Image (cartoon, rainbow, N blue to C red):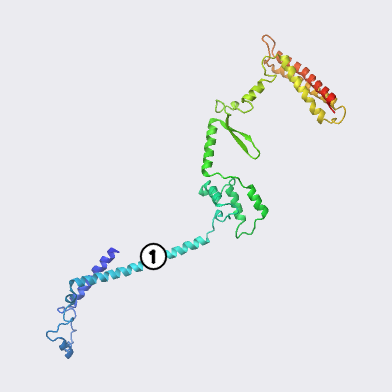
Amino acid sequence: MCEFLTTTTALTLSAVGAANYLLGPDSQAFTAVHGQRPHAPTAHDMQLREPGSATVLDRPLQEALGAKGLVGFGMGFGAMVAAARGVARSNKRRVARRAAEIDVAEKTETKPLPYFETLPPSIVDKETLDKLLAALPKEQWDDPPEDSYLYTLKCYAETYGPGKATKMGWYDYIYMKVSGPEFFDSAEDIANRKKWFRDMSEKGAFPMEFPGPSNVWESGAYLQWRGEEYFAGDQVKTIVSDSRFSKQFIANTAFYREGLKPWQRGLEIGMAHGYFIIGPFVSLGPLRNTPEAATVGLLAGCALIGLVSVGGLLFGTLIKPKLFDKEGDPPASGFQEMINWHALGGIGGAGFAHALITVFGS
């Protein structure tokens, strides 16, 4: 704008100066054409040219306006031209901007709104929707993963809502409210849970929880499931095999308890097996409703004890375990002794249970 104003002002001043020079009294720029005579002065012209009567026509334009007036006239003319051009350009820009706004408005009106903006508050409130959107990156908002509740909301938005052909019934609404998750994790909660899981995996521990009516209760204690070797599968620890209660319980059984002889171990194990083994045959067998149910259960229990004892003898003969052997005894002698007394104790336990059923049973 400044350059345009300077240029137009200079051109205007040049044009005014040239006109002043050419239209002066001493100028010969305009002369009569050859063959023509100048007009004779009339009485009115003679009156105007009387001595002592100076008019504007007798003085040149430079003397009439002066140097300052000439410069001011040129600058004013240039400013007027520049202002006119500026107004024209401003109008053009305003029209172009208005056209762009109309185009954008038309595109916005024709572009469909995202599904999460058309969800009614009866399906999901704004706070819950903000949490769901914050838990996923923006690239997955239009196509959320199927394991996300946002995918379920998208299905509801595509099926129900203003302008849809389907209207939600009362049963569908109740089912939607009952089936919805109780709470939603934010992006920070998901990141913290992933970090916690990674830390627990590196340490080889997991939290001990107790089952409740509708959820699990955290105890605050952690169980170490991994042994000293990171990649040794045989060192995996469980609450059954490595807890203090489990170790003490297993150590007090007849097979592992210290200070017992092989025959004592076999007798105790056999009596326990024979005592409870006849129960299923008596209560669930085909003759359970007959008077001979207890006798049939005793015979079946003794047969089962005999089969187990024969299997133990075969195992001792082939594998020859030296767990209960004394120094100087042949291999598997202690194990064979335990199995023999297991058979005797099993038959005795089954007979004792039969006697109780016969005496006290209905």
Q: Looking at this rendering, what residue extends furthest in the right direction? A: 291
The quadrant of the image that shows the N terminus is bottom left
Residue 74: image quadrant is: bottom left
Residue 317 seen in the figure: no
Residue 104 seen in the figure: yes
Secondary structure beneath dot 1 equals helix
Q: Looking at this rendering, what residue extends furthest in the top direction? A: 328
Residue 138 picture location, percent across and down: 51, 49
The quadrant of the image that shows the C terminus is top right
Residue 8 picture location, percent across and down: 26, 68
Residue type highlighted by circle 1:
Arg
- The front one of 1 and 127 is 127
User: Callout 1: 10 Å neighbours few (<14), some, many (20+)?
Assistant: few
Vertical placement of residue 156 versus 25, above or below: above
Point 61% across, 36% down: residue = 217
Residue 281 picture location, percent across and down: 81, 28
Is 238 situated left or right of 89 in this image? Answer: right
- The front one of 225 and 170 is 170
Vertical placement of residue 288 versus 48, above or below: above
Mark count: 1
- The front one of 178 and 56 is 178
Residue bearing mark 1 = 93
Point 17% across, 91% down: residue = 43
Point 55% across, 48% down: residue = 132
Vertical placement of residue 109 versus 211, above or below: below
